[in-house]
Amino acid sequence: MCGGTGALVASVDYRMGPEHKFPAAVDDSFAAFQWFHANAHSLGADPERIGVHGDSAGANLAAVVALLARDAGRPQLRLQSLVYPIADYGLVGDSYEKYATGYGILTKAAMVWFRDHYLRNPDDANDWRASPIRADSLAGVAPAIVVTAECDVLHDDGERYAKALRRAGVPVEYREFPGMIHAFFGMVPPVDDAMNAQRMVWAAFKRAFA
């Protein structure tokens, strides 16, 4: 990401479940985002050109940080990059059944396991800080690039979130990669579409920061 975008990258070591349940990861991610903005100059970065990126659970947090940044007013984000995001911890969508098992490392049962170790109780799934697609409004959040893998239980989450952002008037670049599975984004260099997906994200950040 750092080499491809030509930008400074900060990787956030947020607290994780089950030791630290929701909303610890959200609080840490937003606190790190605010700290990075406040200290950007000392780190050699431009505080007016900041974006967020994540994949899977990280994309969930990136989407939530984008919403929190909108509500706080500053700092403003140039881009939110979401690679197969978890948009709804209700775990709904046809892809949860179609790709429940047999398509790589992420299964429907694994998602249930992750959810139960992250959330404090089932009601947390209704909180938009856990399920950003359930926010009252997505209007005014940063422009987005959303990447999904066809053969992934999270496929429908990403597609639904991209559509919801568009309905709210948010500029969205959406791309589904046919035949790909969850976690393909990091499968470089052997998988061509992994490299293609990374190049697509790099280009989106370069445009956003130009």
Image (tube, rainbow, N blue to C red):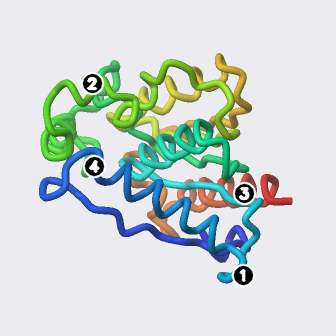
Q: Position of residue 168 (x, y in %)?
A: 65, 19
Q: Which residue is mark 2?
A: 90
Of the image marks 4 and 3, the number of the one nearer the N terminus: 4
Q: Classify 10 Å Cα crowding around label 3: few (below 14), some (14-19), many (20 and above).
A: many
| Amino acid type, residue under disc 4 in the picture | Gly
Task: Give how far apart the Cα atoms at labels 1 and 2 are.
Answer: 40 Å
- 60 or 140, which is in the foreground? 140
Residue at mark 4 to residue at mark 3: CA–CA distance? 29 Å
Q: Residues within 10 Å of mark 2 (few under 14, many from 20)?
A: some
Report the amino acid beneath label 3: Phe
Residue 107 to residue 32: above or below? above
- Taking 7 as reference, is 177 above or below it? above
Q: Quadrant of residue 184?
A: bottom left
Which residue extends farthest right? 210
Image quadrant containing the C terminus: bottom right
Secondary element at tag 1: loop
Of discs 1 and 2, which sits in the foreground? 1
Crowding near the residue tagged with mark 4, few <14, some 14–19, many ≥20 C-alpha atoms within 10 Å:
some
Position of residue 174 measured from the top left corner of the image (x, y, whole percent)? 64, 35
Q: Is residue 199 left or right of residue 123?
A: right
Q: Is residue 73 left or right of residue 164?
A: right
Residue 104 image label: 4
| Amino acid type, label 1 | Gly
> Residue at left 17%, top 43%?
110
Q: Which residue is mark 1?
A: 44
Residue at mark 3: 205
- Dot 2 amino acid type: Gly
Q: Quadrant of residue 45?
A: bottom right
The residues bearing labels 2 and 4 have C-alpha atoms spaced at a distance of 21 Å
Residue in the foreground of this view, choosing between 68 and 2: 68
